Amino acid sequence: MHETQKNIKKLIESIKVDKFHVSCYFKCSVTNRTVVSTVPFEPYSGKIEFTWQEILLHPINSYNRYYHTPITIYGDGCDETIILKAFEKVKNHFVWNNDLNCYVYK
């Protein structure tokens, strides 16, 4: 499996972030074709749980815990990044080329 962050990073032409979505532009350097993938801007892939007592007694802390959870767009040591989620949606447009050691647009 060649879907490492390093290999996918070579394809990134640009990333646009808005309030609700992240758009990743993946460009093949061989064919100059660009594929756009848009994924939701999710603050956390796991589950954030609150008890009613936390919300009632500490509403500001509960709000901060949910809305200020770090978002990883790209990270070398992280398996759950927005870049990987975006590439997962469009990976059928690319094929791994062993000679060039990179993804190439089909």
Image (cartoon, helix red, strand yellow):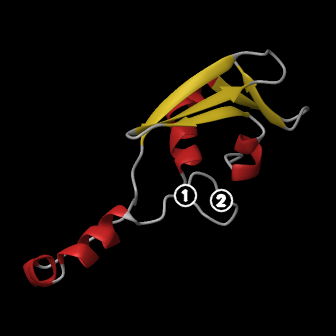
The answer to whether any part of residue 49 appears in the image is: no
Q: Is residue 66 above or below residue 29?
A: below
Q: Is residue 75 above or below residue 64?
A: above
Residue at image position (76%, 24%) is 28
Q: What element carries label 2?
A: loop
The answer to whether any part of residue 75 appears in the image is: yes
Image coordinates for residue 50, horizontal then vertical, percent: 19, 75
Q: How many discs appear?
A: 2
Horizontally, is 84 left or right of 30 in the view?
Answer: left
The image quadrant of residue 21 is top left
Image coordinates for residue 89, horizontal then vertical, percent: 49, 33
Horizontally, is 102 left or right of 67 in the view?
Answer: right
The image quadrant of residue 78 is bottom right
Where is mark 1, residue-wise?
A: 72
Mark 2 and 1 residues: CB-CB less than 8 Å, in contact?
yes
Horizontally, is 81 left or right of 27 in the view?
Answer: left
Q: Could you give the CA–CA distance between mark 2 and mark 1, rounded to whole angstroms?
A: 7 Å
Image coordinates for residue 81, horizontal then vertical, percent: 55, 54
Image coordinates for residue 42, horizontal then vertical, percent: 39, 51
- Count neighbours of disc 1 (C-alpha within 10 A) and say few if under 14, some if 14 to 19, many if 20 or more: some
Give the quarter of the figure containing the C terminus: top right
Q: Which of 91 and 18 is in front in this view?
A: 18
Where is mark 2, residue-wise?
A: 75
Name of the residue lying farthest toward the right: 99
Amino acid under disc 1: Thr
Q: Which of 56 and 102 is in front in this view?
A: 56
Q: Is residue 16 above or below residue 42?
A: above
Residue at image position (82%, 24%) is 29
Query: Residue 47 got which mark?
Result: none
